[in-house]
Amino acid sequence: MDTQEKQSHPIEGLMKTAMQSIKEMVDVNTVVGDAVETNDGTVIIPISQVACGFAAGGGEYELVNAQDKEKPFAGGSGAGVSVKPVGFLVVRMNDVRLISTTGNQLAERIVDLMPQMVDKLESLIRQKNTRTDIL
């Protein structure tokens, strides 16, 4: 086996370093934040969207009057992380809700209240039917 095959390529070291840095920056606590408990027992958990980008590259180049068989290597790597808040998970005694930081919150609230409105309409209709039955 050739000695160059035993040694890792220099770009491998660049990639390992960049990936390790991303791993240290982004963990599960970045997506689902630490829970905060209020005085009334409500627990609020922040939820975020995380996006990562990574690039690495390099190459060997020849010297004009090189007497050494090993070619010099030039390379670089880079990474970027974006964290965007998405909403908050609110946990109360018998209720769990996701409050979004984007979108139409009025429409979301109407959808949340729809079952209560249907229950009230049903009770009003029942009351009206029982009153007409009595008369």
Image (cartoon, helix red, strand yellow):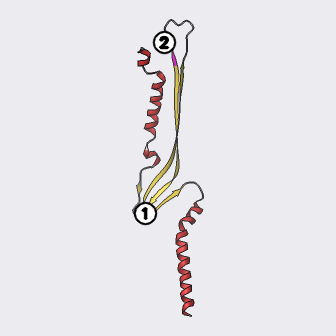
User: CA–CA distance between discs 2 and 1?
Assistant: 66 Å
Residue 113 image offset from top left, x and y in percent: 54, 68
Residue lying at 52% horizontally and 49% vertically, measured from the top left: 85
Residue 55 image offset from top left, x and y in percent: 54, 31
Tag 1 secondary structure: loop
What amino acid type is highlighted by mark number 2? Glu
The quarter of the image holding the N terminus is top left
Front residue of this view, candidates 56 and 5: 5
Residue lying at 41% horizontally and 55% vertically, measured from the top left: 36
Image height of 122 relative to 53, above or below: below
The reply, left or right, for residue 33 in relation to residue 122 is: left
Q: Are marks 2 and 1 in contact (CB under 8 Å)?
A: no
Tag 2 secondary structure: loop
Q: Which residue is mark 1?
A: 92
Q: Residues within 10 Å of mark 2 (few under 14, many from 20)?
A: few
Earlier-in-chain disc, 2 versus 1: 2
Determine the residue located farthest toward the front in the rendered image: 1
Residue lying at 45% horizontally and 29% vertically, measured from the top left: 17
The numbered dot on residue 70 is: 2
The numbered dot on residue 106 is: none
Residue 51 image offset from top left, x and y in percent: 53, 42
Q: Residues within 10 Å of mark 1 (few under 14, many from 20)?
A: few
Between disc 2 and disc 1, the foreground one is 2
Q: Which of the 4 image quarters holds residue 91?
A: bottom left
What amino acid type is highlighted by mark number 1? Arg
Image height of 43 relative to 33, above or below: below
Q: Which of the 4 image quarters holds residue 7?
A: top left
Magenta span: 69-73
Find out whether residue 61 is within the magenta segment: no
